[in-house]
Structure formats: C-alpha cells, structure tokens
Amino acid sequence: CARGVLVKSRAPWRFAGTGSGDALLAGRYVYDVVLGIPVVASDLPTLRRHFSADEVLFFRAGDPESLAEALAGVAGDYDAALARAASAHDRYRKEYDWERQARRYTGMLELLAAGTTWTAPAGLVGRADG
C-alpha cells in the first residue's frame, strides 16, 4: 500500500503590492485534494478560507516543531489523515465544480463589464455561495 502526504510550508501566492500570502489559493493544493493525498500545510488565511482542520492538518508557519508534530500525527494515525483527505475531496467536489465556478466567474465578469468594482465578501472566498 503506497502512502503519501503532501507538506506545504510557504504562502501559496502573493498579490502585487499587498505583501500578503492570503490572496489566492495555489492550484497545487487543489491537485493534492483531488488526488486524495493528505495535506499538511502552514496555517495561512488562504487555506483556512478553503479548508478546515477536519480536511487539512495545519501547522504554525515557520515553526519546525509544529511541523514535526503534524508529520508525527500523520505517521501515527494515517487512517485519520486519509479521512481528512476524503473530507477535503468531498468539499472540493461540492464547492468547486465547474458549474458553480462558471456562475461565480460569470457574475464577477458581468459586474466588471458594467463598470462595478467586485470585492469578495470577507469569509466568503472559496465557500459555496451560489
């Protein structure tokens, strides 16, 4: 039985001028979730917007001891890691399907075409919103 875990430790993306790593979700996280690979990731705002602790095992960014504890937790209970991965996969299938994403993008483009500025409401980024 092949076992795997994906560890991510840096901010996934930076928006120009913000100095913030919480603007966009990197595709690599999505790929791993789709593949059912347990993810151990830095506890960043971007990831918390998209995944819960029931889906991804978080560790404190820049803290090697926290990372070591998270990895030991995965190694000690790989079934729980797979359960988190399955939960993350289920969320992805429900909230990020093509039809839902098309509605989000279409709505945003319609607002922009009308000359309206679009701003995602706090806490809504990446969540099922219609």
Image (cartoon, helix red, strand yellow):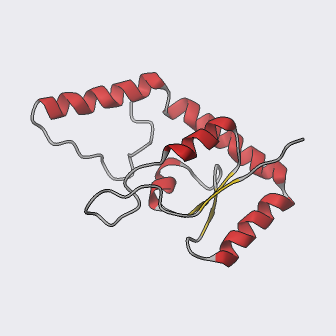
Give the left or right position of residue 100, taking residue 34 as reference: left
106 to 122, vertically: above or below: above
* Percent of width and height locating residue 69: 74, 71
Residue 56 position in % (x across, y down): 63, 53
Q: Quadrant of the C terminus?
A: top left
Of residues 78 and 64, the one nearer the viewer is: 64
Horizontally, residue 79 falls left or right of residue 114, namely right
Residue at the image point whose x is 21% and y is 42% from the top: 118
Which residue sits furthest right? Answer: 1
Q: Which residue occupies the extreme top position in the image?
A: 99
Q: Nearer the viewer, residue 10 or 110?
A: 10
Q: Residue at x 62, y 56 (%)?
A: 53
Where, by quadrant of the figure, is residue 93 drawn? Answer: top right
Instruction: Give the total of numbered labels.
Output: 0
Q: Is residue 116 left or right of residue 55?
A: left
Q: Position of residue 104 (x, y in %)?
A: 34, 31
41, 88: nearer the viewer: 41
Locate the N terminus and report the quarter of the image it occupies.
top right
Kindly indicate the quadrant of the structure image that contains residue 127: top left
**Residue lying at 75% horizontally and 45% vertically, measured from the top left:** 83
Q: Residue 36, how many percent across, how many down?
A: 70, 39
**Which quarter of the picture shows residue 46?**
bottom left
| Residue appearing at x 69%, y 77% in the figure | 65
